[in-house]
Amino acid sequence: MRRNYIEALKKAMVAAIFIFIAMFVIHLIWANTLSRRAYPNALRYLAEHQSEIGNRNYLTIIDFTKPSYVKRMYIFDLETGEVEKHLVAHGKNSGYNYARDLSNEIGSHKSSRGFFVTGEKYDGDHGPSLRLHGLEEGINDNALRRDIVIHGADWVSYKAVLQNGGRLGRSWGCPAVPVSAVEDIVEKLKDGSLLYVYAKEPGDEPNE
């Protein structure tokens, strides 16, 4: 009787471990996949506002439905079809590992959702940086006044994820990127490229 109990317990433990691993793998696949609405939304906006977009070589999407420990910045080369992925931080008051609370308010230290167009490259306190102009009134049009820019930060790295218990460092609202990648990103996206920050809206399905 005792032997049967031990054997049954072992089988149950093996099954539980298998289920945990399967769920973990499924989560990783989901976390590393761009939300299905994001790319069509961005292409539609690009097609309808071409006169506002000076640099049509690249399209960038930041998917804030994903956790900070995955590469959730997607840079699409619209000529070759190639895609780059990068880590990107969110504002410290937008959430711990996910950017759930977004804002256009000056001084909020939160990220903003919606469509932006890039401005000029400049060298700031964080090195090479890129200004962002919000294109949606009441949603992100305070970006320039809030000094929301793309810049590099050493706390945007997998080392930072380990040091912070599973998340990136957080910014004051800027989409900060790895120091090792910032110069290339800025050079590609400067002077009028479209950037779309995709985030959950009220009523969205859980895994949109």
Image (cartoon, rainbow, N blue to C red):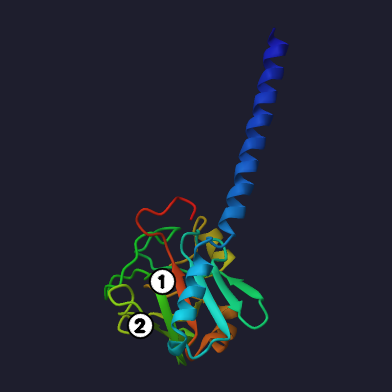
> Which mark identifies residue 171?
1
Is 120 situated left or right of 78 in this image?
A: left
- Residue that appears at 42% across and 63% down: 199
Determine which quarter of the picture holds residue 51.
bottom left
Q: Amino acid at mark 2?
A: Asp
Is 11 situated left or right of 186 in this image?
A: right
Toward the viewer: 187 or 51?
Answer: 51
Q: CA distance from mark 2 to mark 1?
A: 12 Å
Q: Position of residue 198 (x, y in %)?
A: 45, 67
- Residue that appears at 34% across and 84% down: 144
Q: Position of residue 121 (x, y in %)?
A: 48, 91
Badge 2 density bin: few <14, some 14–19, many ≥20, Cα 10 Å: some
N-terminal of the two: label 2 or label 1?
2
Toward the viewer: 66 or 77?
Answer: 77
Is 117 situated left or right of 160 in this image?
A: left
- Residue that appears at 67% across and 76% down: 82
Q: Secondary structure at mark 2?
A: loop
Q: Secondary structure at mark 1?
A: loop
Q: Is residue 178 above or below residue 186?
A: above
Q: Is residue 126 visible?
A: yes
Toward the viewer: 127 or 140?
Answer: 140
Q: Amino acid at mark 1?
A: Ser
Q: Is residue 124 visible?
A: no
Q: Position of residue 63 (x, y in %)?
A: 49, 65
> For mark 2, what is the residue?
147
Q: Is residue 146 above or below residue 100?
A: below
Q: Nearer the viewer, mark 2 or mark 1?
A: 2
- Residue that appears at 45% across and 85% down: 118
